[in-house]
Image (cartoon, rainbow, N blue to C red):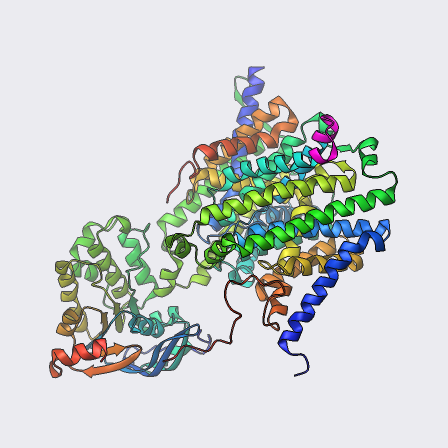
Amino acid sequence: MPEFGRCTLALDITADSTLRLRQVRVSYGEFRAVHGVDLDVAPGEIVSIIGANGAGKSSLLKAIVGQADRVEGQLHFGEVDLSRCGTPQIVADGIALVPEGRRLFPTLTVEENLAIGQAVGRRGEIGFDQVYGYFPILSERRRQQVRELSGGQQQMVAVGRALLTNPRLLLCDEISLGLAPLVVQALYEILPKVRDRGIGIVVVEQDISRSLAIADRFYCLLEGRVSLQGRPADHSRETVMTNYFGA
Amino acid sequence: MLFPPHARVWTGRLLLLTLVVSALVAPWTFGPVHLQLGTQMLCLLALAYLWNLLAGYANIMVIGQHALVGMGAYAFYGCSVLLEWPLLQSLLGSLVVGLLAGILMLALIFQLRDAYLAVGSWVVAETLMLACTKFDAFGAGSGMGLPLDLVKRLGRNPTDRAIAIYTLVALVTALIAVSVYLLMRSRIGLALGAMRDNEEGAASIGVNTVRARILCFLWAAPLTGLMGALIALQKLRISPASSFSMTDWTIYVLFIVVIGGLGSLEGPILGTLLFFVMREFLQDLGVWYLILLGALAIAVILYEPKGLWGMLRRVLPDDLLPLRHRPPQTKRKPITP
Amino acid sequence: MWMSILNQLLQGVMVGGLYALFALGLAISSGILRFVNVAHGDLIVMVSYLFLSLVTGLGLHPLLAAVLLLPLCFGGAWLLQRVLLHRVVGQGVLPVILVTFGLSVIVQNGLQGVYGADTRKVAALGFESATWSLGGGVNIGALPLTIFVAAVLMIGGLDRFLYRTRRGAQLRAIADDVQAASLVGLPTQRLYGLAMGLVGLTVAVAASFMAVWTNFDPSAGPNRLLIAFEVVVLAGLGSLWGTLAGGILIGLAQTVGAQVDTAWQSLAGHLVFLAVFLVRPQGLFPKY
């Protein structure tokens, strides 16, 4: 757990928004999920992390927002040392997570769920109007409890909640899981628009083709280590498959 | 090394054996006053084992045990005095009533979970107590003393009676301790262990968790009633204040188990010993004694959840009374490929 | 004779307001913090003693003392959560019950050590015996009516706070899924502290009224806890207005029981609770 009181946030809006991970190891109790990962994400680029179940992708994202059991190595977001900060501070600094499985608050309305994002985040350009612009259906259902919504609509709320924090870096953990292809298509069409605002995006997926199609760069994780990285165009499908499943 | 781990375990087992043997030969070695103290200790130890079975192993934390004690005491009175049954039948009567009261309590609270179950059991306890104290035949609010001819059946003089009571209590306590041990070594114990670690997981692979827990409860309930009867015999009276005393039969028992070590066989023994040692020296403190107990219990839960036994267990390679269904633990290293 | 019975029943309904106040704090702690505070009743009694000390010891006007208690109890409860309870809340079932049980024993005996075991009551300048006539021979005690109105206001206020404000939505969020709340950046520990602070407020109000209405002694805590518990279970998980219904039910049951025999008062309440619980274990107005 981070040592509180030693977290200094970047208060300058022009601060560096580059994520830098060096030799990051993540453990849960005695089990090590991530064995030393180097990773960079620059503002305004979409980075995809692919890997099989249990490869360590979710653990990595949780570690970035300060929710992992034990983290070693260096995690920097610009000048800020993430390992010294708690999740509320990291979110306030501009990193937002769309959690795996959506993790909405079932008895709260769409509006209330979105408002939570706004409450924990920073001030910025993205407000309710922008989110309803991305996802018009949510505007119609704003006063309904989210447990009454379909899976795809719930995923939209989850993404909207993260966007309302006005992040500089958006982390998406398996947002396509369990959703119909058309719905996933709609979600993925939003991501480049978000990127064009200058926000860095990390997309974690098990589904390779979708995420590589929109990624500027990608990393492939295998059993907690980076087995392949680069630009999607530079690697053949066979190479990617080999590094996804391991030799 | 001066005191190797296995030597420590066997020393512990030897100490335990000494305790058991001295408890067995007590009627010949101690006078009536000490025997009375021994009886009290064994009563609390027995109740501790029963509560530990429910809360530590079966994960049914009840705070209503004192009601079953009271019901057993009142049942004994009813059988032996009002119905004029012989001693043995009256004790069996308290067993049956304990079982019935247990079934009633179970039926009422089984729907509840965790803390709701605990307080729910308290509600049932309170209700049973209030109901029992309405009956004039049992002395209503002030209770009744046991009649002299009943008392004489135990023995002609106080010394004989003390020995008789002690022997009864010791036998029942031994029965309870051994039965808990055997229960935990059986398939039920295995089921409960699995359930404690992961209830959903255990249920999903076919472990009948509900049946295991019900069985434990229905085993503990009549025996608690029986203890109530024995306590009434020892105190020579029944009354709402003493038979249904929450302080004596729930609070003290709870503290004994928690401080001694919840979920272990050795813990209740440690807890009882500590409790009586503390009582010897700190009795004069009055309310501060209970405050100290409460604070100690809180400290234990926060810093050493497995109690005194948990602390000792760390320097021992195995339990004194092994329950494990798997080989002794080896030192674990982090799993890294 | 009928008039007297009617008056008694009316009184029973008003008592339901007091019981609802007892239960409100437990409803918040069990609904939002997801734990049952076994020391809840004892904390109410402790605050009643505090009230007593403020009025008789410091000579404060009862109303002033009650108002003073509000921030005191808010802060005290907040502190209790941040210093002690946060270590065990959410850590599994047993530790919380045991810690709060230990707390209950400490408070009861501490009160006995400081104040002695005699029963006490706080005199409120004659207000406690005033009655108002509603016409037609129907009389209502000023105090019971005030308590009932206070309960309604308190429930209404809490309901409004929880469902119409942002902070309230955040509290409901941690009630729904505290892990998710933590993941998206909500300051869960601070919100828990706020929730306990609200509990403290309800305890302050309940304790002040109780001290004037009935006798109390250091061992009165468990009785209050059991009543609060029964009301919360009757109300149903997550229901605030349900506590009023539950309180009235128990209050009426006790009044009817007392008509039969004064010694049957408590027992009647418990029996009615058990009966309703058997028929409808999820409570009257469950939200989940």
- For the question of whether residue A28 can be seen, the reply is yes
Q: Main secondary structure of the magenta part?
A: helix
Q: Nearer the viewer, residue A101 or B271?
A: B271
Q: Position of residue C179 (x, y in %)?
A: 39, 61
Say which of C100 and C136 sits in front: C100
Q: Judge whether residue C140 is colored magenta.
A: no
In the rendered image, residue C16, in percent from the top left (x then y), is placed at 52, 34
Q: Quadrant of the N terminus of chain C?
A: top right
- Residue name at image x 46 percent, y 78 percent: B333
- Residue sticking out furthest to the right: B157
The foreground one among B77 and B143 is B77
Q: Quadrant of residue A96?
A: bottom left
Q: Is residue B78 left or right of residue A68?
A: right
Closer to the camera, C281 or A109? C281
Residue at 47% x, 57% y is C194
Part of the protein shown in magenta = B79-90
Picture coordinates of residue B252 (x, y %)? 68, 51
Residue A75 percent across, percent down from the top left? 35, 81
Q: Determine which quarter of the picture holds residue B265.
A: bottom right
Q: Quadrant of the C terminus of chain C?
A: top left
